[in-house]
Image: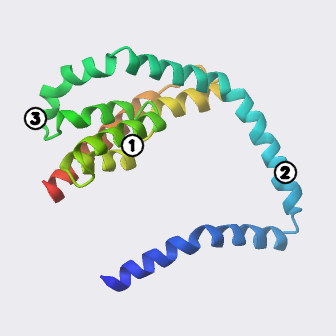
Amino acid sequence: MGILLTIIQTASVIAIPAIVLFIVVYGAIKKVKIYEAFVEGAKEGFNVGVRIIPYLVAMLVAIGIFRAGGAMDILSVLLSPITSLIGMPAESLPMALMRPLSGSGALGVMSEIINTHGADSIIGRMVSVMMGSGETTFYVLAVYFGSVAVNKTRHAVAAGIIADLVGILASVWLVNLIFG
């Protein structure tokens, strides 16, 4: 097991520099003006950033109102009987609810839970796994669809919610299996 861990650690250290080097070498081989292409891409990225700011502000304000107004606590209390049936502690429910909404909000919830219960507690481990296995579905939908003016998301919302539920259930199951 020691050699595998060493290989993984070494690969993680060299991965990003290797990717950057590959892009530069590949661009040079294809005779692409690398710096000019980078600057043009950065300029487009800035324009996209300016276009998505209203959607980002709206989403962050809505999340702030949701948490500050006590809706998170009420929802946690209402759903706790269901979560106890699947082996999910009620204390980890705010993380499951916040993760699809906001990455920074979920990080705050996770930090709060870990400070309260400890990183090695079952709850601390569960929220950590949820953080890594979930996506900020509603944030992504608001920002990306908003930036290109998509009004009809079709199945994206349902697919995102289903993926979030699967991630939460898998997190609960795996943490209970391994650490429970």
- Element assignment for label 3: helix
Q: Amino acid at mark 3?
A: Leu
Give how far apart the Cα atoms at labels 3 and 1 are: 21 Å
Q: Are marks 2 and 3 in contact (CB under 8 Å)?
A: no
Tell me: 10 left or right of 6: right
Q: Counting other residues with Cα less than 10 Å from the Cα at mark 2, is it few (<14), some (14-19), or many (20 or more)? A: few
Placement of 111 over or under 16, stated as above or below: above
Going from N to C along the chain, the mark reached first, 2 or 3, is: 2
- Element assignment for label 1: loop
Percent of width and height locating residue 170? 26, 47
Q: Residue sitting at 86 percent across and 64 percent down?
A: 32
Residue at the disc numbered 2: 39
Residue at the disc numbered 1: 134
Q: Amino acid at mark 1?
A: Gly
Q: Amino acid at mark 2?
A: Val
Tell me: 114 left or right of 144: left
Placement of 70 over or under 94, stated as above or below: above
Q: Quadrant of residue 168?
A: top left
Going from N to C along the chain, the mark reached first, 3 or 1, is: 3
Is residue 152 something that shows in the picture?
no
Q: Residue sitting at 89 percent across and 62 percent down?
A: 33
Where does the N terminus fall, quadrant-wise? bottom left
Residue at the disc numbered 3: 85
